[in-house]
Image (cartoon, helix red, strand yellow):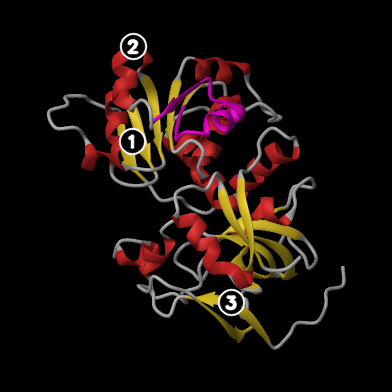
């Protein structure tokens, strides 16, 4: 597939410093790819909540002195790839860039080939850009860290009824169930056979049920503590926490002795209720590892129509400030996407 010639420069978003809360739209040279990297012409990208302040945490990979370009999620077209790579110029791909490197809010980005997966045929650029980081984080929270058996997923060639049966015996509570990561966690856990409880705000209950939750808790009406106090049998085996704060504190009341809490937001022990004596098999905060292989597994579910991303809104690059305002408002239902080109 012949691609148009590369320009000399490109537009990109940039933090003036890694600790700046604002962004500027500027011009930069086209980046050069290394031996294990591909150059991607970006069609769409997606920011993460609070990513402009990640570098304030010295332990964060984002504090590495990288070029401060935001948006780790992307979808686009391969311009060039290393010899022997499974990717070639013209391939439509999507992926998530490791937070230690410059992001994809630019017209061209350099990406490790191990972070790439081919775009499912039924997906457009915007949906694809809304997928990788959230879906990978949820995949790792539910299966790698949370202990559900991936073999139980509907739509997998290696679907094992035994794995689904074991997953059916587990109950999973997801906080932030209508958000970027939470919406994927609900889908993956439900597809794998688990019984899912989604915690979300008012007006989002229908979406969360559509994604696969058998029960929904509207935290604006009923706290998680109140919900579990009403019926001790409502305790869960696994909590996938996507928001921290009071929701995670309440989740401590909801998880069984011997159960697990996996948070993508903060260390669960920091919000353990005072005096609560409960022994868990796992209490973990983790940061995802980007993986093209896992994203390829997710792509199979997308191709089969078994899962889908939630796209809240799409903004042109020139309106990036509105995109970040929407993201930070807390009202987004799913991912906010920035369109780089049609």
Nearer to us in this view, 84 or 269:
269
Q: Tell me if 63 is positioned left or right of 294 in this view.
A: left
Q: Tell me if 281 is positioned left or right of 165 in this view.
A: left
Q: Is residue 258 visible?
A: no
Residue 221: which quarter of the image?
A: top left
Q: CA distance from mark 1 to mark 2?
A: 18 Å
- Check residue 211 for magenta coloring: yes
Residue 200: which quarter of the image?
A: top left
Give the magenta-colored segment's residue range: 198-219
Mark 2 residue crowding within 10 angstroms, few (<14) / some (14–19) / many (20+): few
Nearer to us in this view, 126 or 307:
126
Is 261 above or below relative to 77?
A: above
- The outermost residue toward the left is 275
Q: Earlier in the sequence, mark 3 or mark 2?
A: 3
Is 315 above or below relative to 147?
A: below
Q: Earlier in the sequence, mark 1 or mark 2?
A: 2
| Residue in the image at 30% along x and 42% along y | 245
Q: CA distance from mark 3 to mark 2?
A: 52 Å
Report x, y in % for residue 206: 57, 29
Q: Are marks 1 and 2 in contact (CB under 8 Å)?
A: no
**Which residue is the site of mark 2?**
231
Nearer to us in this view, 267 or 211:
211
**Which residue is the site of mark 1?**
247
Secondary structure found at label 2:
loop
| Residue in the image at 56% along x and 50% along y | 335
- Check residue 35 for magenta coloring: no
Q: Are marks 3 and 2 in contact (CB under 8 Å)?
A: no
Q: How many marks?
A: 3
Is 329 above or below relative to 90?
A: above
- The outermost residue toward the right is 1
Q: Is residue 17 visible?
A: yes
Mark 3 residue crowding within 10 angstroms, few (<14) / some (14–19) / many (20+): many
């Amino acid at each position: 597939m012949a691609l148009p010639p590369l320009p000399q420069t490109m537009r990109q978003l940039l933090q003036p410093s890694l600790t700046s809360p604002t962004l500027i739209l500027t011009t930069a040279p086209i980046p050069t790819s290394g031996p294990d990297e591909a150059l991607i012409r970006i069609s769409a990208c997606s920011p993460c909540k609070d990513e402009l302040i990640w570098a304030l945490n010295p332990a964060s990979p984002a504090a590495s002195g990288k070029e401060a370009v935001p948006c780790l999620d992307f979808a686009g077209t391969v311009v060039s790839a290393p010899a022997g790579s499974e990717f070639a110029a013209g391939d439509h791909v999507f992926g998530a860039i490791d937070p230690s490197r410059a992001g994809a809010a630019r017209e061209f980005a350099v990406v490790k080939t191990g972070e790439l997966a081919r775009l499912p045929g039924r997906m457009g650029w915007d949906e694809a850009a809304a997928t990788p980081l959230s879906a990978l984080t949820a995949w790792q929270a539910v299966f790698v860290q949370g202990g559900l058996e991936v073999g139980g997923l509907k739509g997998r060639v290696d679907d094992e009824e035994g794995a689904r049966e074991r997953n059916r015996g587990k109950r999973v509570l997801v906080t932030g169930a209508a958000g970027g990561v939470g919406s994927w966690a609900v889908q993956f856990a439900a597809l794998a056979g688990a019984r899912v409880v989604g915690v979300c705000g008012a007006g989002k209950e229908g979406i969360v049920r559509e994604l696969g939750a058998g029960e929904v808790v509207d935290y604006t009406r009923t706290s998680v503590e109140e919900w579990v106090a009403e019926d001790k049998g409502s305790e869960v085996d696994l909590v996938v926490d996507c928001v921290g704060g009071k929701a995670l504190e309440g989740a401590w009341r909801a998880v069984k002795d011997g159960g697990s809490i996996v948070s993508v937001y903060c260390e669960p022990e920091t919000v353990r209720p005072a005096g609560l004596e409960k022994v868990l098999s796992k209490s973990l905060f983790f940061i995802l590892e980007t993986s093209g292989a896992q994203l390829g597994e997710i792509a199979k579910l997308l191709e089969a129509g078994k899962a889908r991303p939630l796209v809240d809104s799409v903004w042109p690059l020139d309106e990036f400030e509105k995109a970040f305002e929407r993201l930070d408002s807390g009202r987004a239902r799913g991912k906010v996407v920035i369109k780089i080109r049609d």
